[in-house]
Image (cartoon, rainbow, N blue to C red):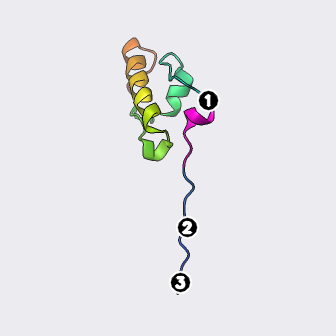
């Protein structure tokens, strides 16, 4: 029997879609979307963010943690 391969849709970068040019560490609501319940930054393969914004996101999350805006573990 021949089976059709099911292709998953390519994930779209959240920041490009919403025309966000800079990931701000003070925007905790947006940052919390990209952090797992364990407090880890979710990878690009799951979130679909581009490499540029993934780097900015990681830096912003680390800065927010340092400032106490974002907790290490939820």
Q: Secondary structure at mark 2?
A: loop
Please name which of the two marks, 2 or 1, marks the residue nearer to the observer: 1
* Residue under the point 50% across and 23% down: 23
Check if residue 15 falls in the magenta segment.
yes
- The answer to whether 45 is drawn above or below residue 57 in the figure is below
Q: Which residue is mark 3?
A: 2
* Residue under the point 44% across and 47% down: 45
Please name which of the two marks, 3 or 1, marks the residue nearer to the observer: 1
- CA–CA distance in space, label 2 to label 1: 30 Å
Where residue 15 appears, x then y in whole percent? 56, 32
Q: Which residue is mark 2?
A: 6
Whether residue 35 is visible, yes or no, is no
Where residue 36 appears, x then y in whole percent? 45, 36
Q: Which residue is mark 1?
A: 19
- CA–CA distance in space, label 3 to label 1: 42 Å
Near mark 3 (Cα within 10 A), the count class, few <14, some 14-19 or many ≥20, is few
């Amino acid at each position: 029997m021949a089976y059709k391969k099911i292709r998953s849709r390519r994930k779209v970068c959240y920041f490009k879609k919403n025309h966000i040019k800079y990931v701000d560490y003070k925007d905790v609501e947006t940052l919390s979307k990209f952090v797992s319940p364990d407090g880890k930054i979710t990878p690009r393969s799951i979130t679909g963010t581009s490499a540029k914004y993934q780097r900015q996101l990681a830096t912003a999350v680390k800065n927010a943690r340092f400032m106490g805006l974002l907790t290490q573990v939820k």
